[in-house]
Amino acid sequence: MVLESLFNPFIIKRKPWEMFGAGFIYSIVGLLLSYIVFKEAAGLLTVFLICFAAIPLLYVTVKNEEELDMKYNKELSLLKEHTKVLLFLLFFFLGVTAALSLAYIFLPAPLVKTVFSLQEQAIVNVNNNVQGNVAQFNLFIRIFLNNLKVLFFCIVFSFLYGTGAIFILTWNASVVATAIGNLFKTELAKGATLVGFPVLSHYLTAASFSFFRYMTHGIFEITSYFIAGLAGGIISIALIKHDLQNDKVLIDALDLILLSLAVLFVGAVVEVYVTQPMFS
């Protein structure tokens, strides 16, 4: 297909930044097509179309990672190779987030309401789950368990569908983009009376505040989900190719899952003890 042919999956690990462009382009095309064809379900269909465009790239990448398990004897060398894929996936996530954030900010309000209504409701549900007058440690437990549930489904989706975690991660990117766009508009409204150079300064301040409010801890959470998704994908492909009898595959997948749990734990700590005090 045309979108798939724009990026070469065999060299993308050497140029992971190209995936930012892939995520950005796939998101814009998916958003336009979903709104034109199925306006009522545009929010969810946008996520599906982004995933459809990305799956060929991701499948080849995960398949190559599973094959590396057969070549490398040292787990540390293998983890270094996996790091290249994580960069590839993170740039893709940032590309999707950037495109949908800009869409949320600049599209007309009625269109934004149509496209992002599901994401806005998801944000309300998350806020209701973690807000309240609770101790920091209890809040940490709530956030960690909620994120752990997402991580679990990343593994399950990847195991069942090979690259299935991309749906959950793209959905999360759309929710994060909605949150960033919403906060940006809120911060911008506070300086509506400014003119001249202060306007530019306020735009930059609002943009940076909105981005770091969610990405300070979000980068750890997303990295954790990507690691878990990669582990599930490797197991899925190894099962299909009958490579699971090789202990190296299972050891590699288990190491990735343990690493994802550690990163997820750090993300919860950062959200509760850094992000919340800094941006509240």
Image (cartoon, grey):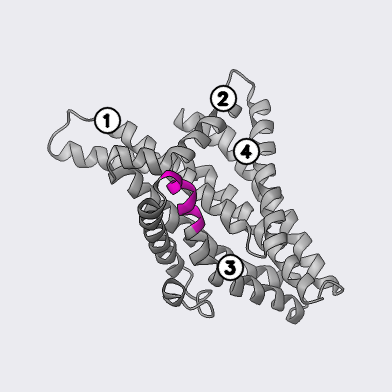
Q: Name the residue rendered at 48%, 61% in the picture.
A: 92
- Quarter where residue 159 is shown: bottom right
Q: Earlier in the sequence, mark 1 or mark 2?
A: 2
Q: Earlier in the sequence, mark 3 or mark 4?
A: 3
Q: Hey, what amino acid is under mark 2? A: Gln
Q: Rate crowding at label 3 as few (under 14), some (14 to 19) or many (20 or more) other CA atoms within 10 Å.
A: many
Residue 166 figure quarter: bottom right
Q: Residues within 10 Å of mark 4 (few under 14, many from 20)?
A: many
> Going by the picture, which residue comes out furthest to the left?
196
Mark pair 3, 1: CA separation: 39 Å
What amino acid is labelled 4 in the image? Answer: Val
- Does residue 262 appear in this view? no
Circle 4: element type: helix
- Graded by Cα atoms within 10 Å as few (under 14), some (14 to 19) or many (20 or more), the crowding at tag 1 reads few
Residue matched to label 3:
85
Which numbered disc flags the more N-terminal residue, 3 or 2?
3
Give whichever of 245, 159 is nearer the camera.
Answer: 159
Q: Which residue is mark 4?
A: 269
Separation of residues labelled 4 and 1 (CA atoms): 31 Å
Dot 2 falls on a residue whose secondary structure is loop
Q: Mark 1 sits on what residue?
A: 189
Q: Upstream in the sequence, badge 2 or badge 4?
A: 2
Up the image or down, 244 lies above or below 91; here it is below
Kind of residue indicated by mark 1: Ala
Residue shown at the point (63%, 63%) measured from the top left: 163
Report the predominant secondary structure element of the magenta stretch. Answer: helix
Q: Is residue 161 magenta?
A: no
- Part of the protein shown in magenta: 40-48
What is the residue that sits farthest to the top in this orientation? 133
Q: Is residue 36 above or below residue 215?
A: below
In the drawing, does residue 200 fall left or right of residue 20? Answer: left
Residues at circles 2 and 4 in contact by the CB criterion of under 8 Å: no
